Image (cartoon, grey):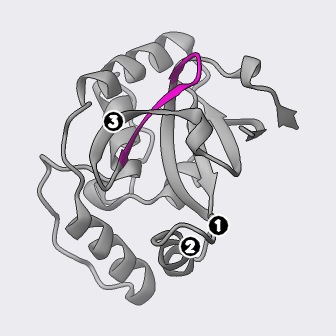
Amino acid sequence: MIMDLRDLQPGDVLNSIADPKMLLHGPIAWGTDNPFVHTAMFEQGLVSISALLDGVQRRPLEQWDRFMLVTRHPSPTTAALALAAVSNLVGVPYDLIGLAGNTIEAITGADMPDTDNRRLICARLIVEAFATAGVEIMPGVKYPNVTPRDIVENSTLETVGYLRVR
């Protein structure tokens, strides 16, 4: 189903499909063998919160010039709690070393050491938000090294549809 921006609900998880113009998207898509390369959480209006190289920030949805798969927790209360948790993480720095470790793990299957838990990558931001809300969305997945693919393939969040911002 193709969604409209008006269909988004606070706490929805936005899963971006690789954009060939973005420097890191190619290696992430290749390393995880999956087209989903970034996750963010919808806040309200035209704003999402995500972790990119400049850290966890509020970002306008207009910056996403591609399709996104929208997933949603079935409980609006849990989604609201997860959104509050994400909001409290704005300003946390990005974990570039963790991103490299995730890519190496995906390519080689090697078990990389955990990285600094005070830094976040996009998928870990989502996992931590739901964990703070009391819901483990990635049981059995090594917590710090979760990928956008893991977020899309988990069984806790429900697929709502596809969204194209522009």
**Residue 35's disc number:** 1
SS category of the residue bearing label 3: strand
Q: Nearer the viewer, mark 3 or mark 2?
A: 3
Residue at horizontal 34 percent and vertical 71 percent from the top? 102
SS category of the residue bearing label 1: loop
Q: Which residues are magenta?
A: 43-51
Q: Amino acid at mark 1?
A: Pro
Q: Quadrant of residue 19?
A: bottom right
Please identify the dominant SS of the magenta region. Answer: strand
Q: Quadrant of residue 96?
A: bottom left
Q: Quadrant of the N terminus?
A: top right
Query: In the picture shown, does residue 34 fall above or below 92?
Result: below
Q: Quadrant of residue 98?
A: bottom left
CB atoms of marks 1 and 3 within 8 Å = no
**Residue 137 picture location, percent across and down:** 45, 40
**Residue 29's disc number:** 2
- N-terminal of the pair, mark 1 or mark 3, is 1
Query: In the picture shown, does residue 166 fall above or below 100?
Result: above
**Residue 147 appears in view:** yes
Q: Amino acid at mark 2?
A: Ala
**Residue 69 picture location, percent across and down:** 69, 45
**Residue 107 picture location, percent across and down:** 44, 86
SS category of the residue bearing label 2: helix
Q: Please name the residue that numbered disc 3 is placed on.
A: 57
CB atoms of marks 2 and 1 within 8 Å = yes
Q: Quadrant of the C terminus?
A: top right
Residue at horizontal 55 percent and vertical 80 percent from the top? 30
- N-terminal of the pair, mark 2 or mark 1, is 2
Q: What whole-number distance in Å separates the C-alpha atoms at marks 1 and 3? A: 23 Å
Identify which residue, 42 or 104, lies in the foreground: 42
